[in-house]
Amino acid sequence: MLCVAGLFVCLFSEADAGGETMRLAATIETIHGEAASVTGSLKADKATPAKDHLDANGIRAQLRATPSGAPAPAGGTAFATILLTNETEDKSVSAELVFDAVDTEIKSITGGTQKDDDGSGAKVVVVPKLLQRQTERITVELQLKDNAAAKGNNRLRVTLRQPGAASASDSTVLSWSVADCPGAYYNELVRIRETSAEAIATLLKSVQAPDRDRPGRWLFPPTASSRPGAACLKSEKYYDRRYRRTFVRCTEYETLGPDIDADILKREAQVLRFASPLVSRRTVDPELSIKRNAGWVSYKIGTDLQGYLTQPKSPAICTGVLEFTGYYRGKLSEVTSRIDMYSSNAEDSLKVARARVALARAAAANSTEGHPGWGAGPIDSSPPEGDASLRQLIAASASLTGDKPLQDSVAAAASDFEALQAMKAFLDGNGAAAFPKDVAAALRPALSAIEAADYIAATAGHYAAIDRHIGGSLASIDKAHADHCGCSR
C-alpha cells in the first residue's frame, strides 16, 4: 500500500514480485492547475523499497492524484493522471491501462484509445504505439461518493500491462477520502448559536439598563479632602464674603500609620472620580449606549454575528470564515480597550479599599473610647489579608462594630452591595449609638472605597460578559472552521 503521509490519498500497491505492501510518504501538489509529480520521503514495510510508479517490462507509469492534502467534498470530482513512458530497448511498444472503479464512478477518460468493456466493468485504455522518449498522458475523471455510500474511501484500481506478456503487469489503487465539510461546520454553527450567541442580544440590552436595586446615589458619600491620601475627620462651614458663598473646609485629617501604603491612597481620588458617574447611572457606562462608540460596535458585531450564525446550510459556507472573524475581532478592539481600562481601575479600587479597611481596623485597635467589647461580640482589629475580596473587606468592617446580627446579615447578603446596605442601615440606625465616633469616622471612608470598588467591578463585569460572548463566539467559529473546513476545494 502506498500512502501519502498526512494526506488523504493512498496508493495500494500490489507488486507481482514478492507481493510486499508498500507505503509512500509523499506530497502531492498542484501547480498552475496541473497536478505535480509525487515527491517526498519513501518508506517501506519490511525494508521493501517503495515506488511511486508502475512498471511492466520497462513500460513505466508515473501516478498523479488530485485533490490531495485534505478530504474531498462528497459529490465532488477527483482526477487520476498517469504519465506513460517507454524505457524499453524497443523504439515502439504497445501498452494497456485498466481502470476499475471501486465505490466510485468514472465520468470520463482522456488520452489513449478506449477498448470495449471486458465484462468486468473495468475500463481499458490502449496506447498502441508508445515511442521511446515519448510521454503519453492519460487522465481519468471520477465522481466521488460520500463515505457512507462508498463504505469508506472512493478507490480506483489502476493496472499497467503489456499486451501479449502475461507476466508484464503491475497494479495499484488510488484512494480518496470524502467528508461533508459544509455540513459538519454548519452543525457547529448551530451549536454555537444555541449556546453563547443567542445570549448576545439579551446581554447588550442588559448592560445598557441601570441596576434598579441601586439607589443612584452613594450609600457612603466620599469625604472631600484637599490632602491626597488622608480622609477629613472634622469639617466646618464658613462664609466667604468675596464670593458671597458658603464653603466647607476640613479642620482635622486622619493620621496615616507607618504600615499604610500612602501611594495607594493617592489613587483614591482617581478611583472615586471614576466611580461617581457609575453610581449616579447605576453601573451603566454611557459608552455602552447604542449612540456611543463602544455600544454601537458591540451592537453591530452582535447583530452581524447573529445573522452569520443563523444562515442556512450551503456548499460555500466554509468560504471567507477567517476574513469574517478577523474583521470583527479587529473591530472588537474598540471594546477591549475599555475592558483594559476597567480592569486597571478595578484593581486599583480594590487596593484602595484594602488600605482603607486597614486604617479603620487600626483606628479601632487604638481607640480610646469604650473598650473591645462595646458591642455584642469581641472585636477583631487585625489588618485584612492582602488578597481580601470585597465581601471579606465588608465582613472585616462589620466585625469592628462588635454587632453579631450585623455580621450575620453581611454574611448572608446575596451580593456585595446588599452587604453594604446592611452596613448603611446599622451606621444610620440606633445600633451604632454606642459605636466610637473615631472608629466610625475611619470606617466611613473605607466603606466609600468598598462601594466605589463594587460599582467599578459591576461595570467591568458588563465588558467582560461582552468579551466572553462575542469574543468567545468568534473564537468558537475559528475553531469550528479549523476542525471541519479542511476539505479540498
Image: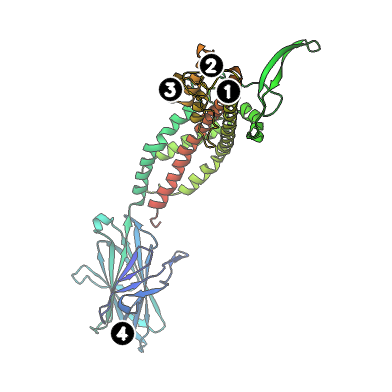
Q: Earlier in the sequence, mark 1 or mark 3?
A: 3
Residue 58's spot in the image, x, y percent?
34, 84
Query: 396 or 467, which is in the foreground?
Result: 396
Q: Are there few (<14), some (14-19), or many (20+) residues within 10 Å of tag 3?
A: some
The answer to the question of whether label 1 and label 3 lie on touching residues, with beta carbons closer than 8 A, is: no
Name the amino acid, label 2.
Leu
Identify the element where label 3 is drawn: helix
Q: Could you tell me if the residues under marks 1 and 2 are in contact, i.e. CB atoms within 8 Å?
A: yes
Is there any visible trace of residue 266 in the rendered image?
Answer: yes
At which x and y percent is residue 459? 53, 30
> Residue lying farthest bottom?
89
Label 1, label 3: how far apart the Cα atoms are? 19 Å
Give the left or right position of residue 145, taking residue 5 as reference.
Answer: left
Instruction: Please state which of residues 346 and 5 is positioned toward the viewer in this rendering.
Output: 346
Q: Are marks 1 and 4 in contact (CB under 8 Å)?
A: no
Colouring mode (rainbow / by chain / secondary structure / one colour): rainbow
Amino acid, disc 3: Asp
Q: Is residue 341 above or below residue 154?
A: above
| Mark 1: few/some/many CA within 10 Å (<14, 14-19, 20+) | many
Q: Which residue is mark 4?
A: 57
Disc 1 to disc 2, C-alpha distance? 10 Å
Task: Please state, as top left, top right, bottom left or bottom right, where the N terminus lies in the image.
Answer: bottom left
The answer to which image quadrant residue 60 occupies is: bottom left
Residue linked to disc 2: 427
Q: Label 3 belongs to which residue?
A: 408
Closer to the eye: label 4 or 3? 3
